[in-house]
Structure formats: C-alpha cells, structure tokens
Amino acid sequence: MGVMPDSEPGPGLRERKKIRTRETLRREALRLIAEQGFAATTIEQIAAASEVSPSTFFRYFPNKSALLVPDQLMDPIIDVFLQAPAELSPIAAYRYAVEQVFGQFSDPEWAEEAGRQALMYTLPEAAGPLYRQYIFTIGRITEALAVRLSRPADDPELRIAAGAMTGVMMQALHGTPMQPEMIYRALDFLDAGLPLI
C-alpha cells in the first residue's frame, strides 16, 4: 500500500527491498503478538519469522514498541498533500491526502491497521515511540506547509497549524476503532475554524 506522485519516479530496487523488509517485520510482529501477546513476543522471534537477523531488525526499528507506530503512512500522505488541488485550504488539502491514501487500503489492510492501532493505544511501552512519531509528524507537515504555501519552514505559524492538524488526528484515533469518517470529520471541523457555537 502506498501512494506515489505520478510525476515522480518510484523508489529504486534497493529502496523497495528495504520497504518490503520493514513491512514484513511489522506484519510478522503483529501476527506473533496477536498469537502470543506483546510481552511474550521477542525480537528474536520477529526476526526469525521475517527471515532476517536480530541486528537487521534494529536497522529498521529501535525497539519492539516502535513496530506499532504507523510511520509508513506519512510519506504517501505528504506526497499527495503537496499535489492536492491548489484551491484547497491547507487543512482541506491534508484531509484530501489522508482520504486518498486511506482509500487505497484493502479490507485485510484495514483489519491489520485497526488491530495495530488498538494494541498501540493500550500498551504503556508504545507511549514513547508514539510521542516521537507525533513530533516527527508535526515536523513533516510543517515542511510540507512551507512548500505548499511558499513560506519559510521556520515560520512558527506553520508549526502551530501542523500541531493542530496532528492533534486532531490524535484525538480522532486515540482509544477508538480506526474509522476514516471520524478522521475526515475532525479535519473538517478544524478547517471550519473549530466552531463550537
């Protein structure tokens, strides 16, 4: 699963192999965790199921908890965001990108993502990696806003907007089953200026 801009060449063979290895590690980890629980699943087991060494595992993930963080979605969303129709507001363009990327999920991919998300929000061990991912996401959205709006990347207003967009996504996802409509509704609410009255 992934969205690549039509105007950009796809990743090379080496990059595709890295993406496949990363996805295999994540998929096998989630399968093992579903079978035997998070605590009982070891990095050695995940590596063996993925047919790589434990040292290879650590080239892709700093620890077991990091497997739960959906970092694989950020690049496709940013790619589509930068190509979204120019007449859309920045928040509407981000919603458009999220909808386009999520629209490519198959039913089994949705089931896998929903399971990963449910596990991520119930494990204290995932809190640190998840927080780092949120900070990373704010940075990526800030950079994309700078490109889309032709503004300096260090403009604090861009980071504030990126933080608001990320916060809306966090609230729409936290502790609830993953529902795209809730995410779209939350972004629409933000784009409307958070009208509480």
Image (cartoon, rainbow, N blue to C red):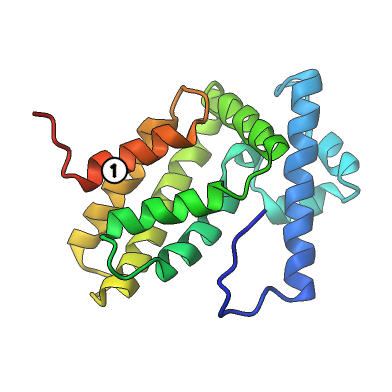
Residue 38, image x and y in percent? 70, 24
Above or below, comparing residue 72 to residue 14 in the picture: above
Residue 18 higher or lower than 41, as above or below? below
Furthest residue in direction left, as rendered = 197
Quadrant of the rendered image containing residue 105: top right
Please say whether residue 138 is visible from this viewpoint.
no
Spot occupied by residue 143 in the image (x, y as percentages of width and height) = 36, 67
Left or right, residue 110 beside residue 180: right
The residue sitting at 26% across, 77% down in the picture is 150
Q: Residue at x 82, y 38 (%)?
A: 46
**Residue 18 in the image: above or below residue 128:** below
In the rendered image, the quadrant that contains the C terminus is: top left
- Residues 155 and 53: in front is 155
Whether residue 20 is visible to the viewer of this picture, yes or no, is yes
**Lateral position of residue 35 relative to residue 171, left or right:** right
Q: Residue at x 74, y 76 (%)?
A: 12
Residue identified by numbered label 1: 188
Query: What is the x, y in percent for residue 180?
Result: 48, 37
Quarter of the rendering containing residue 6: bottom right
* Residue at the image point whose x is 60% and y is 30% from the top: 114
Give the class, few, some or many, for how many residues have Cα within 10 Å of label 1's Cα (few <14, many ≥20): some
Q: Position of residue 184 (x, y in %)?
A: 38, 41
Q: Amino acid at mark 1?
A: Asp
How many callouts does the rendering have? Answer: 1
Helix, strand or loop at mark 1: helix
Front in this rendered view, residue 12 or 36: 12
